[in-house]
Image (cartoon, rainbow, N blue to C red):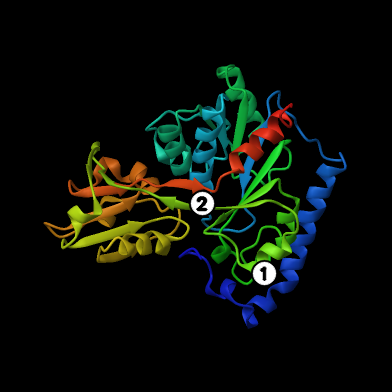
Amino acid sequence: MSRSAPGFWQRRGAVAWSLFPLSLLFGGLAGLRRGLFARGVKQVERLPVPVVVVGNIAVGGSGKTPVALWLADALRARGRRPGIVSRGYGGTVDGVAEVPPAGDPQRFGDEPVLMATVSGCPVFVGRDRPAAGRALLAAHPEVDVLIADDGLQHYRLARDVEVVVVDEATLGNRMRLPAGPLREGIGRLAGATLVLAHDGLSPALAAALGPVPVFAFHLAGDAFERVGDRRQRCLPSDLRGRRIHAMAGIGRPERFFAQLEAMGLAVERRPFADHHAFVPSDLRVPDGDVLLMTEKDAVKCAPFAPADSWVWPVRAQVAPGAAELIVEKIDGPPTA
């Protein structure tokens, strides 16, 4: 679970059960809202190109941003020209705006800046996802498919494909907000086009999903890059034996730390809340020590990172068949 998540979300204890009536109310209102869109009472806006929604059912990091980047690459490799729309969580944009590569994370949000920098796709942010999509298509008429990052619950935007990203560890006690971490119940997964499961699913959860296709994925990277000059690279073996501080302001910082330790690195863990607004004092390390950070944090810390700071870029490695299924849902089944 996220460092900022309440501890009682991990178990069905007294606090969780005391909040259960509120979670029933939350679930009922969420279901009513979704039903109003499904019945046409509330307007669903369809854009002139296919829309692939990438989202999750739980609060906290599940790997949505790496999956969105993987999807952009996969679509481009198959002849598509994708664009990305995002809410711009943590930013200050009023209305809709295009995110420039290496843009200001305080204005656009850290994840949109990361996607604009890495993906090579046009990225637009806005709380109104259909408006962001229309603006992107007007500015970039070559785009022929949109990826809606973290858009599963944004039902006003019509979607052709739903990709739900699941990290089973973030599901906690399997209760809805505020008693637990779920935005929507486990049963919502059965209505998705496909589920991408971080490190796979337990047999019990996989069985509960029924026929929905499930593809495992994991995050991997092969080298570190210097925060101040991403052209400079080093391997984990180059850092062994050094005093290392590992910093992460992501949904599940402990996963980042564990991956570094699995490389044989002894690290001092520095967890921060997801989307933490870093300041120079957060990055102070003794002279001669090394600071490691995630790519999402590096977009915010680059202007004031110490010289011996390194970022670990990771990419989603998805089981074969997922990209082909998404393209088939967009284009229709291949002809004989």
Which residue ends up furthest to the left in the rendered image? Answer: 288
Q: Position of residue 226 (x, y in %)?
A: 24, 43
Q: Report the side of 217 relative to 206 (left or right).
A: left
Crowd tier of the residue under label 1, counting other residues whose Cα lies within 10 Å: few below 14, some 14–19, many 20 or above: few
Q: Secondary structure at mark 2?
A: loop
Taking the spot 16% from the left edge, 61% from the top edge, the residue there is 242
Query: At 68% across and 29% down in the image, what residue appears?
Result: 50
Amino acid type at image mark 1: Ala
Q: Is residue 216 above or below residue 302?
A: below
| Of callouts 2 and 1, the N-terminal one | 2
Picture coordinates of residue 321, whole percent (x, y): 60, 43
Circle nearer the viewer, 2 or 1: 1
Quadrant for the C terminus in the image: top right
Q: Which residue is mark 2?
A: 63
Outermost residue on the bottom side: it is 14
Distance from label 2 to label 1 (Cα)? Answer: 21 Å
Disc assigned to residue 255? none
Residue designated by label 1: 204
Give residue 251's position: percent from left, percent from top: 48, 57
